[in-house]
Image (cartoon, rainbow, N blue to C red):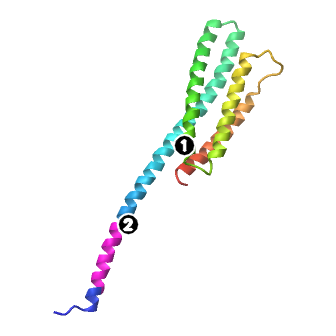
Amino acid sequence: MMIQSTDIIAGVAIVTSVITFLWGFKKSKILNSQTEWYRIWASDFLQQANSFNRLASEITVGISLWNNLNNEGKSDDAEKKLEEITRSITEISFYEWELRKYSQFAPRNADKFCQCADKLFKSLSELINYCKNPKREGSFNLEEIRTAQFLYSKASRDLHKELLGL
């Protein structure tokens, strides 16, 4: 029995196909696990970034309500509102800390995101300090917080995209 060159070529083609399939399968598995990691990490980031933004709104609106209750002489209601605000401030500090870990995996957008988060956190701190001592001249401009929230949301979206590998 004589082996023809076409049989050799067919055999090589089959072996090459099997090796390529196995190599591709292994690479696909690695890629899928990396994609899954990116997807979960990006999802967690988005959830925490949105919570941070929501708390910024709750603190801003809460302080406004607290101020109104104080001005109306409803000290008991004002005290309850102040307790809610204090819990929100503690919670937003936690999110501010947590969000930093995600930015480490998105080097293109990390600096911008951190700057925007810092600006929003700083604006909230200034509002809180203003409310502690409202007797100083001028008033607090809440639009600064709204603008900071918008820029923070945009930076969050960009960081989220990078975390997804887009």
> Residue at coordinates 56% horizontally, 38% vertically from top-left?
99
Say which amino acid is labelled 2. Answer: Gly
Q: Quadrant of residue 82?
A: top right
Badge 2, how many Cα within 10 Å: few under 14, some, many 20+?
few
34 part of magenta stretch: no
Q: Quadrant of residue 59?
A: top right
- The residue under label 1 is 102
x, y (%) of residue 6?
A: 28, 89
64 is higher (above) or lower (below) than 15 = above
> Residue at coordinates 72% horizontally, 18% vertically from top-left?
131
Q: Which mark is residue 12?
A: none
Q: Quadrant of residue 86?
A: top right
x, y (%) of residue 161?
A: 56, 50
45 is higher (above) or lower (below) than 124 = below
| Type of secondary structure dominating the magenta stretch | helix
1 or 2: mark nearer the eye: 1
Badge 1, how many Cα within 10 Å: few under 14, some, many 20+?
some
Say whether marks 1 and 2 touch (CB < 8 Å): no
x, y (%) of residue 156?
A: 60, 43
Quadrant for the N terminus in the image:
bottom left
Q: Give the magenta part as a residue range.
A: 9-23
**Image-based side of 6 in relation to 150, left or right:** left
- The residue under label 2 is 24
- The earlier-in-sequence mark between 1 and 2 is 2
* Element class at badge 2: helix
> Residue at coordinates 39% horizontally, 61% vertically from top-left?
28
17 or 104: nearer the viewer? 104
Report the residue that reaches farthest toward the right: 137
22 part of magenta stretch: yes
